[in-house]
Every structure is written in structure tokens, then in C-alpha cells.
Image: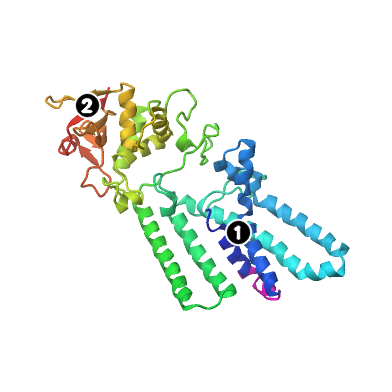
Amino acid sequence: MFLAHGPISYLANEIIQKKKISHLKFHEQLLVSILAIFFGILPDIDLLILPMFSIPQFSHHNYFTHAPLFYLGLWLLLKLNVYIFDRIVNKKTSAVLHHDLMDVILNTFLIATMTHFLADTLVGGIMLLYPISTFKFTILSSFMIPNLFQQYFLLPDFAIELVLCSLFFIHIYKKFFLKNIFFDVLKYFFVSASAVFLFVTVFFSTQTYNKSYMYDNNGKANYDVDMDGLNDKKDMDIDNDGIDNIVDIDLKKLTKEVKDISESGKLASFDTGSIQYMFGGFNSYRLLSQAYFNISSPIEGVLRNTEKEREYWTKLEYPELLYGYFNANALLKELDLTQESVLNIGTLMFLLDESDKVVNIALVVDEDSVGVVLPQDRQLKTHTLQELFESKYTSVKVTK
């Protein structure tokens, strides 16, 4: 969550301290509102601090800077300082920074920071009891795992943020702005639109194959299993043995994953421009890439590095990069289509057009079945070799 931390902290503070805030002067209420938003964002300050110590930003939930007990201790320290402050300032200062205002501000700090961590547990994992325990608590992430390929702004997580932001703007509008018919209509439009969008994202989330967490030896979700400072999704060599993830695999495990995913019946989309694809539907490349990810050998890092090394003039799609990788490393041979060939289980196939561009990708999963997404597919399933070869292509190259 990155958009709604400030807004949700503001809303929580307004609800919990409604009576106390109402007794403050208007300019004091405005100050409290600004501080609620600021304090709600404050725990994410570690995103700026950690890189100074060569610590990757994606691991910021793993440190004391993102631990509720740290902020609880900080709140107690601030409370002690305010107690001392009340007894040493003169009347003029006390009239401005009076007890009621300081009490509300202190409570705002606690409410906003704790709300931040509560929000993080909705869509992520937080070590609520750190340093007593490093166990990460989560609520929605345990049964709403994000799709590996879907953009964040199309996930239910982002839709939830939009709903919260809409409620925030309505409250701000009512409290601080003049009544306006245009904004009255607009606020209801935004709430309705965000609610509909939330429904759409949740619907597609139930239809797609979702597995985007990699787990360490302790069974915990981890973005950097090999602890080399690289996000696993971008890591070329996840086990640090000097061999690219693409070829450093157990082929039997990869084949099994392709078959299992193909038989899941989840959303498929051959067309990369479709709404289904946009919301996480699988084409053949995604099917294969997900299988690699499931066996802890993500391939996108290898492919993008290959693209960078070759300095392509245009940014190629992943299927082309995958084909280019296998071709450049002399790992392919052309399949003689005039003769009947026996393909081994685990054979990767690239179907090409007359200009040698990738039309489709398939992996042989048993004697007469392949993991592939064909143009007519709406759900994932395995296909026979005959069904595969009925599609349009000019030549076929397979792994040696």
C-alpha cells in the first residue's frame, strides 16, 4: 500500500478522536489533519533511509523502522517530553501549545502510525511483535495472493486504496471546503467508480492463477531468498552458482509445474491486448514463466539482462527474448516437419512465422500433450500435439 496510508490514517484519527478534535480551534483542527496524514506516511521514511546503508527498499518491512513496538516506544518518549515541556514553558507558549492540543497531536501520532501498520497487514506482512518475534502478520495476503504478471494498479490491493482515498476526499471536502454541486456529484462518482473497480479486480483475481511469492528454507515469503540484495524477480542467478536461472533447473519439476498450471483451468488469453490478459490471464509465455517461478528460477531477470547486453534498438517482448536467449546459446534445433518426430517430455518448442518471429511457445508435458495457450483458449488446459500443429506457423524450433 502506498497511496492510502495518509488518507486512512486521517480517517482513523477523525473517527477515534472526533470529540477531542471538535473542541479545538479551526486552525488547530487543520494542523491535526495535516499531521495525521504525515504521521500515517512516516513509517515509510525507511524507504529513503535504507538505501543509504546499501539495503534494498523492498526489504523495508524487515527492520525495526517498520515495527509497531518501535513507534509505541517513540510515542511514550514523546509523551514524557510533552509532560516536561508543559512544566517549563511560560504562559504565552502554553496558550498556543496548550495541553488539549498537544494531547490530540500525541494521540494522532500513535493512531496514525498504528493505522499504517494495520493497513500494511491487509495487503502485506508486518512483524507486529518485532523484536520479540519476527513472524509476519497478514490478513488479505493469506488468501488474496497477487498475480505475478499483473500491474499493481489493476490489483484488488490498489482498488482498496482507491476506495479509502475516495472516502478521505469526501471527508476533507465536507470539513474544509464550500459546498459545490459539481463536487457533490464528483464525490459520489469517485466512490461508485472505485467500488465498481474493486468488484472487477476481485472478480478477475478469483479467475486468474495467482502465485507471486517465493519462499525461503523456513517456509516464509521472501523477496530475496539468496540474500544478495536483488529482488528475486530480477535476479539472474537465484542460487549464486554462476548459471542463469533459465538453464539451471530440474526439467522434471518444470514440466510438472507447466502441466499442473495448465490443468488448473484458470483464465487464459492468447491476445496480449485483451482485458483478460491485462488482468492477469495467461498466454503461453506467462504459463512457462510462472512454472519457472514456481521452481524458484524466475527468468525475467535473465531476459532483460540479455536485452541490455545486446543493446536492442526496440524493447522486445519476453517471448522474443526467450527465443533469442535459447537461439544465441545454440540450445535449439529445427524440427523437420516433413517427418514424424518423437519429442521428449520437457522439450521446449518455439513456433515461428516466416520472419522468424515467435508465434507461440509450448512445452511437452507427456507423450502427446503440451502446455500451451492457443488462440481459442479461455481457460488454461493441456493440448495434444495435433491441436498445436493445427495453428498457424512456418517453422518450429525445439530444445536439443
Q: Are marks 2 and 1 in contact (CB under 8 Å)?
A: no
Residue depicted at x 62% and y 46%? 46
Does residue 105 lie above or below 226 as drawn? below
Query: Crowding at label 2, few (<14), some or many (≥20) Cα neighbours within 10 Å?
Result: some
The single residue placed furthest to the left in the displayed view is 338
Q: Position of residue 254 (x, y in %)?
A: 35, 32
Q: Nearer the viewer, residue 97 or 220?
A: 97
- Say which of 21 and 381 sits in front: 21
**Residue 378, image x and y in percent?**
25, 50
Q: Which mark is residue 60?
A: none
Q: Nearer the viewer, residue 368 or 84?
A: 84
Residue 326 at least partly seen: yes
Residue under label 1: 115
Where residue 343 is drawn, which disc sits there? 2
Q: Main secondary structure of the magenta part?
A: helix
Residue 154 is one of the magenta-drawn residues: no
Give the residues drawn in magenta, as a range.
15-24
**Within the image, what quadrant is residue 114 found in?**
bottom right
SS assignment at label 2? loop
Give the farthest residue toward the front: 313
**Residue 244 position in % (x across, y down):** 42, 26
Q: Which of pointers 2 and 1 lies earlier in the amino acid sequence?
A: 1
Residue 169 position, x and y percent, is 53, 67
Say whether residue 206 is left or right of residue 213: left
Display coloring:
rainbow
**Residue drawn 34% across the image and 22% down it:** 329
Give residue 95's quadrant in the image. Answer: bottom right
Q: Quadrant of the C terminus?
A: top left
